[in-house]
Amino acid sequence: MEIPKIIFKWAWTLDKRLARDPKWEEPSREHMMGLEKRIREEWEPVGEDILREMSKITKLAWHEKDITCYISYGITPFSHPLVISGNSTIHDVTHELIHRILSYPKNKVKKFENQNRLWERYKEETDSCKIHIIVHAIHSAIYLKVFSQDELDANVKRSQPYSDYKKSWDIVKRDGYENIIAELTKGS
């Protein structure tokens, strides 16, 4: 199974162009380089395991050899391009990579019907909540395989202020991450 190499990079040019709340003070060059080093050191011992598990759990392939993960500040992380904030952890990187593997055009076609069936089941929820039910189910499986229940619980607690995230974690707990993943990967 081919997995991509994740390249962590502070891109000061990107920092100059991203929109953020004006209350954010731009960190020093040394601070940003330290963040780049920290996240790389967190990722190195477990990154390949995370990527392999993600592909195995979803039954989806990676379609890139390298993925650059840009590090910025004062922003919400996102998956295309992969950008994380200075307070992010490898769990935030993992979250965004789950979005990424699910959104490759070839993978979207493969999972389209199953995803739509899941979304129909949760039709009363917001789009963000529905998307994150799938992401959090996959992330739960990765946490329990690569990390621990304690780290999963800490991440769930950390995301409580965001109502769609809280609701999606509650649904994953109620309906079972294994059941959601089974529905998503049915027929694969």
Image (cartoon, rainbow, N blue to C red):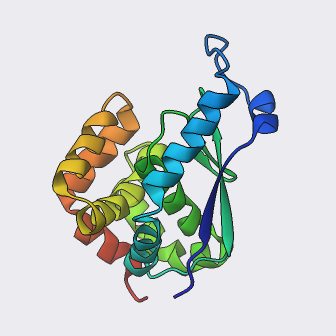
Q: Residue drawn at (21%, 46%), measured in percent from left and top?
A: 153
Q: Residue drawn at (49%, 44%), measured in percent from left and top?
A: 38
Does residue 131 appear anywhere in the picture? no
Q: Is residue 67 above or below residue 52?
A: above
Residue found at the very far front of the displayed protein: 30
Q: How many marks?
A: 0
Image quadrant in which the C terminus is located:
bottom left
Q: Residue drawn at (33%, 65%), measured in percent from left and top?
A: 142
Would you say 116 lies left or right of 74 here?
left
Measured from the top left, where is residue 102 in percent x and y? 54, 67
Would you say 103 lies left or right of 57 here?
right
Would you say 162 lies left or right of 25 here?
left
Would you say 133 lies left or right of 102 here?
left
Q: Residue drawn at (30%, 77%), measured in percent from left and top?
A: 182
Measured from the top left, where is residue 70 in percent x and y? 66, 47
Nearer-the-camera pick, 152 or 166: 152
Measured from the top left, where is residue 178 in percent x and y? 24, 70
Does residue 126 appear anywhere in the picture? yes
Nearer-the-camera pick, 8 or 76: 8
